[in-house]
Amino acid sequence: MNKTYLAVDFGAGSGRVIAGYIENKRLVMHELHRFPNRQIKLGKHIYWDFLSLYEEMKTGIRKAVKEGYTVKSIGIDTWGVDFGLIDKAGNLLSNPLCYRDSFTDGTVEEVFSKISREEHYKESGIQVMSINTLFQLYAMKKENPDMLESAAHLLFMPDLFSYFLTGKSNNEYSIASTSELLDAATRKWNMKLIEQLGLPRHLFAEQVIMPGTTRGKITPSIAEETGLSPDTEVIAVGSHDTASALFAVPFPAGRASRCAFLSSGTWSLLGVELDAPILTEEARQAGFTNEGSVGGKIKFLQNITGLWILQRLMQQWESRGEKSDYETLLAAAEKSTVKSIIDVDDNRFDNPADMESAIAGYCRETGQSVPRAQGDYAICVLSSLAVRYKKAIEQLNKLLPAPVEQLHIIGGGSRNRLLNRLTEEATGLPVVAGPVEATATGNILLQAIASGEINDKSEIDIL
């Protein structure tokens, strides 16, 4: 069988193990295993169930072996900012905290009473969000300083999964850049900032490895558990899922900076790929972030609340026993006459106990019609997202040498034809949808390049 690459893609709601190989200059992918990703409230904190996720990953690997795939390498990508701590004996100190936990409340103000917001952005280039690793670590230092001091390594989620496959401790560039602790220009840890905040220097690996680098070979025990060859490598792909997704976008040659991307899912990430960060005060004020990408490039983007609001509404309806599926919901949305628009980035929509009530309350306060039926709520959310995307494009154009000419929508949200149409109408830009499985596609393509099977992604038919 063809040389096979496994993409292990962990999202905030679910994870997948996908096998991919190249055949006749086409990328062929097969989903082997899908599993839920749960947020677990324990005591006063919300955690990720890392142990369960790790076991699910191994289940997917075993399935690949059982189905006869000849696995060359494994690439792992996850959401950003969250991390685990490893002690000096190589043990996980605690399940990783979830970015939706409220333990960072108040830390943003406290941190910026010590350092300048403006100077900090000139170094990090990252949009300030209380969920970022910087604020998680600062809050942890206050609540549990002993744990931080006893830790030997800080490993972001993809680094953590890789560590327990290979026994090698390393931090990959794209995921490290989400921390707000990396220097955007040098692409190295900002040790001056780390010391200013009183965080232990020893947590941060001296060298940040780049996408396309080998993290290490799997350990003998993992080879025995899974049936993989002991020579199987774990490759550092674009370990932040957005970086892998962006690598899958077939931008026209030399036109990447004129083609915006929108990674559409639970979060919406809208921006362009650049060779160097934009660290101006105008970029900071507009809420842009400079995250690492494949090839040492920069994803210059805004983090926007995405389909999370609609997902929560659907969960709420289903919990009440009301049928809620996308096909029916979008059909009802198209028939709705509701024109109400909400600010999708308003904090009240972050994680409310009742999303319906949060939207209804916002509409009342702003003098707009209150949605009543499911279709009303859906068109309200989707129209609001399209309006927010328009704003992001306008802000982006003010910061670029030339305006954006096209918008590529990737990820699961690219299948939402209604949202795509509303976005095209709102922005006035032609919209290109796909690939849907952008993250797994980019993950596997980079593994194929790292293995030497192909030289460039342009050799492969992606769409």
Image: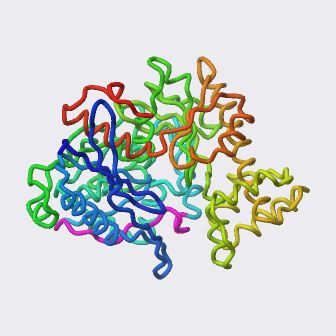
Which residues are drawn in magenta? 89-104
Q: Decide: is 388 above or below 54.
A: above
- Which image quadrant: the C terminus? top left
Residue furthest right in the image: 367
Q: State the residue at coordinates (69%, 74%).
A: 322
Residue furthest bottom in the image: 43
Residue situated in front as seen by the camera: 74 or 323: 323
The way the protein has been coloured in the rendering is rainbow
Q: State the residue at coordinates (52%, 28%).
A: 278
The reply, left or right, for residue 89 in relation to residue 250 is left
Q: Decide: is 421 above or below 228.
A: above
The reply, left or right, for residue 377 in relation to residue 314 is right
Q: Decide: is 275 above or below 72.
A: above
Query: Residue 200's x, y, as percent?
Result: 32, 57
Q: State the residue at coordinates (23%, 39%).
A: 213
Residue 118 appears in the picture as rendered: no
Q: Is residue 92 magenta?
A: yes
Query: Residue 181's x, y, as percent?
Result: 41, 46
Q: Mostly what secondary structure, the magenta segment? A: loop
- Which image quadrant: the N terminus? top left
Query: Residue 230's x, y, as percent?
Result: 8, 54
Which of the 4 image quarters holds residue 404?
A: top right
Query: Residue 415's x, y, as percent?
Result: 57, 46
The reply, left or right, for residue 361 in relation to residue 72 is right
Q: Is residue 213 magenta?
A: no
